[in-house]
Image: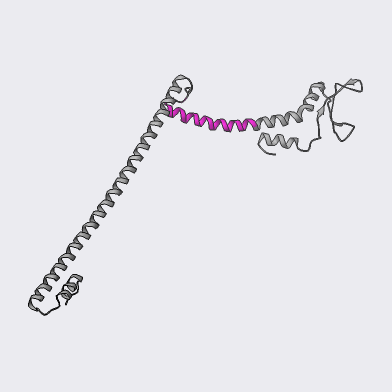
Amino acid sequence: MSDDVVQRARQALDGITPGPWRLPATLLGSKNGTVFADDNDSDTPYQVAVIASTRGDADGRLIAAAPQLVADLADEVEKLRVWRSEALTVTAGLQDLGKALGVPLGHRITGPDATERAQALVAEVKKLRAEKAAAERGLIANRDAAIHMTKLHHRSMRERYEAVAERDRLRATITRVEDALDDMEQNPYANCSLTLRRALDGEVQ
């Protein structure tokens, strides 16, 4: 048999004569000491126990009440166990709350003082959340500003490189035109239009 009292109770009830059990006040005109079990499937009740003690009435009442009483007590124990488990969880939470409120162990965490501490704690949490949100907004703004500045810097560098390349291209074009003019002075029979066009297009003789 199990060591658990509820399981022992359930096991004790397993297989007993179906009830309800009862103890009639008298039986055949005499003081009764017999416990019967009523069965809905039979017109004749079953005899469960015959009480031979001098306290047959009291013993009989106990025996007759035993099945339902044991079942009810087992149910109550199971309910109390559930309540105890839930109460332990609540107690642990209250202890944590007491620590957060600065209430020493063994002191009440309810009442005006505790309420005031709780309200102060809630206000502090709201303040910290607001500061956290503000800090996050500041970080996002700084990040966006840094990204924007980086893009501007990259665009400025690209424009600078393009300007330098354009300057070098113009210088090369001017040099080719000057060289073409020198050639034209030395060769008056040269095709001036073709020479200048080649110089502007970057063609080298």
Residue 151 place in picture, x, y as percent: 28, 52
Q: Nearer the viewer, residue 3 or 86?
A: 86
Residue 58 place in picture, x, y as percent: 79, 21
Residue 197 place in picture, x, y as percent: 18, 72
User: On screen, 7 above or below 164?
Assistant: above
Point out the residue furthest to the bottom here. Answer: 189
Magenta part of the protein: which range? 79-105
Q: Is residue 94 magenta?
A: yes
Give the position of the N terminus as an image quadrant: top right
Give residue 68's quadrant in the image: top right
Query: Residue at position x 34%, y 38% from top?
Result: 135
Q: Is residue 192 magenta?
A: no
Q: Main secondary structure of the magenta part?
A: helix
Q: Is residue 4 left or right of residue 135?
A: right
Q: Nearer the viewer, residue 187 or 53?
A: 187
Q: How many marks?
A: 0
Query: Residue at position x 48%, y 29% from top?
Result: 95
Point out the residue furthest to the right here. Answer: 28
Give residue 114's quadrant in the image: top left
Q: Nearer the viewer, residue 13 or 99?
A: 99
User: On screen, 30 above or below 81?
Assistant: above
